Amino acid sequence: MPVDGRRGEELSRLPAAPGPGPGPSRPTSADVARHAGVSRATVSHVLNGTDHPVSEQTRQRVLAAARDLQYAPNASARALRAGRSNIVLVPMLRSATVPGADRFLESLDRELAARDLVLLMHGDRTTSGVRGAQAWAELRPAAVYVNVSRGTPAAVELLRRAGVQAVLLTGAPRVDYAPTVPLDPAAVARLATRHLLARGCRRLACLVPSGPLAELPTQRYEAVMEVAAADGVPVERVDCELSSDSIAPVVDRWRDPAQRPDAVYTNSDPFAILLIDKLRAAGIEVPRDIAVVGSGDHPLGAALRPAITTATFDVPAIARVVASSIRRLLDGADLDPGLEAALRPHLIVRESG
Amino acid sequence: MPVDGRRGEELSRLPAAPGPGPGPSRPTSADVARHAGVSRATVSHVLNGTDHPVSEQTRQRVLAAARDLQYAPNASARALRAGRSNIVLVPMLRSATVPGADRFLESLDRELAARDLVLLMHGDRTTSGVRGAQAWAELRPAAVYVNVSRGTPAAVELLRRAGVQAVLLTGAPRVDYAPTVPLDPAAVARLATRHLLARGCRRLACLVPSGPLAELPTQRYEAVMEVAAADGVPVERVDCELSSDSIAPVVDRWRDPAQRPDAVYTNSDPFAILLIDKLRAAGIEVPRDIAVVGSGDHPLGAALRPAITTATFDVPAIARVVASSIRRLLDGADLDPGLEAALRPHLIVRESG
């Protein structure tokens, strides 16, 4: 929470906000200062949590005065008057199980806070277009960061008319109606496939996890197909779930070497871990008989044996350039020039493939 | 920021939205009942969180129908016209890696939406007390749901004075200054330990993952100690990380049967999976030589062999009673009477212990 000195000063220069409650006499920080017998600066230091040293006794007196007077800073109301807020609104990703999604949000919060911005996440994971934009605009954010599939041209227009200063989209392909972070979640699948082809694999399989997340694995399957087709290599599509019942029949079929791929891209590391467990039980050795590559660099993938080769994004680096780009847009500048570089996936070659 | 009637009017001057906006044919609970193929009474039971037993399948059907039709119960519609906000603000949990945290938020969003409430998450994961409350109050939520360690008495008072109608805390022990969801994250450790003692285990070990989440594993270790001590059973504390380098030396020591516990509570299923992998490599068999029990019911725990015995909470059930309790508090009623039952952990006995 970037309640820092600069912000505290900004706030104290803004006019008093109208209250949430009834009555014209909403207390100001000056009233709190008078009531506590301290300066307005001290009130600001205490209530905005600056680094300025304030004795515990004084702090308690200010808090007590704020309480007595029912003083609650209303940054949103002030921001509205001044035509700005410091809220960055991120509608939640479609599924809780997108690998790395929560790690991304944790990093993004830290990076935004360092730039005097507050991360708010909207819990609704599906509403998109104009209906989504109406819900997001009601929160009067300074910026909205949302997937391009939900941030349609009409949605972006509505947000801008509603006073949102920066609308940053994410996803591929890049669009022309709003700045876009061209993050392509299928890029890891392309990288993994190129690696397997370079290793000499000539018969691929691709696990396609079903369920609420099916969209992403299907995009990745298509990316594997595309890269493999360029080398004339066939790809077997294996729809499955992260369960024993789902993977066992596949492995059973692969007991026959004539039916067996020489490499599998599993979409995520947990699927790679499960597949290797079932292959081992069937006497099929990884990587000798089948190479296995996952995505997302799950800690278990590095710790188990064989360790999982994985294609992954640098999640903290992406959070950093996204936060920096939002700050820059709010300040009237362009996207962070390091954006493209931070979005490039990389391969961690371990034992499985 | 309140999503209230006034704002709705402002927005209606923006480009018109397609879809089920505030048209003349506002759906009623009868429409929801027809759409879901159930009675109006059932719709009421599900959306108002009464005691009446409703099957999970039916419940999900009603929630889906309410969402499809954008059904908003009348009481809430009145509240919206009266200028109240429908925002439930949840400050994010300390760490992204709390098992089940994101699954909980996904369920909570669905349950709140069915009750005409909007889930917003504040990205800051650490600010607590009065400073936290000021940041949360600025968003003018109808309700705040936050851990008891961050929702101090002064914080709760500030929120109430700022107009927040329902402040619901979560955590153990229950406090007297605000309604509390007495969810004790250590309860799963107690349950697991009682299970291991009942199996006849007489020498326990407890993995205590270090890192940003250390607080929770330590609470669970203390719970294991407490339950085991009552039976005079010693507990070895093993501080570790989810990495090969961290677990390997522990397993090395346990090669000596004189040094070896007969059961391990691992805190989470991924740690159980890693431990079993390293034990296997050392020729120590699970559960024959050591029983292993995790927590959280990770899908991999069910799918790998040996399948992991796990003590876990019913995350969707908890989300349901939390949402229902918030709705009831806003409507001037008490917490959902099904709260205590939904918080009870349960054990899934599989192969590992």
Image (cartoon, coloured by chain):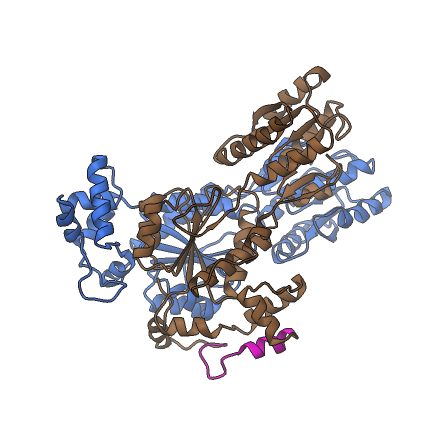
Chain colours: A blue, B brown
B86 sits left or right of A84 in the view? right
Q: Check if residue B26 falls in the magenta segment.
A: yes
The image position of residue B111, as x and y in percent, is 54, 61
Relative height, residue B326 to residue A114 (above, below): below
Decide if residue B244 is in sight here. no
**Is residue B228 shown left or right of residue A77?**
right
Q: Is residue A110 visible?
A: yes
| Percent of width and height locating residue B36 | 63, 73
In-front residue for pair B120/B164: B164
Screen quadrant of the C terminus of chain A = top right
Query: Residue at the location (43% across, 68% down)?
Result: A155
Q: Position of residue B340 (x, y in %)?
A: 56, 51
Report the magenta residues as a range.
Answer: B20-36
- Is B193 or A128 nearer to us in this picture? B193
Examine the structure image and report whether residue A222 is included in the region drawn in magenta.
Answer: no
Q: Residue at x 49, y 63 (%)?
A: A150
In the visual, does B194 lie left or right of A17? right
Q: Is residue A130 above or below residue A6?
A: below
Of A352 and A100, the residue lying toward us:
A100
Q: Is residue B255 above or below residue B137?
A: above
What's the residue at 73%, 17% (across, down)?
Answer: B257
The percent position of residue A193, horizontal first and vertical second, equals 66, 45
Which residue, as the protein is rendered here, is positioned at the far bottom? B24
The image quadrant of residue B307 is: top right
The number of discs equals 0
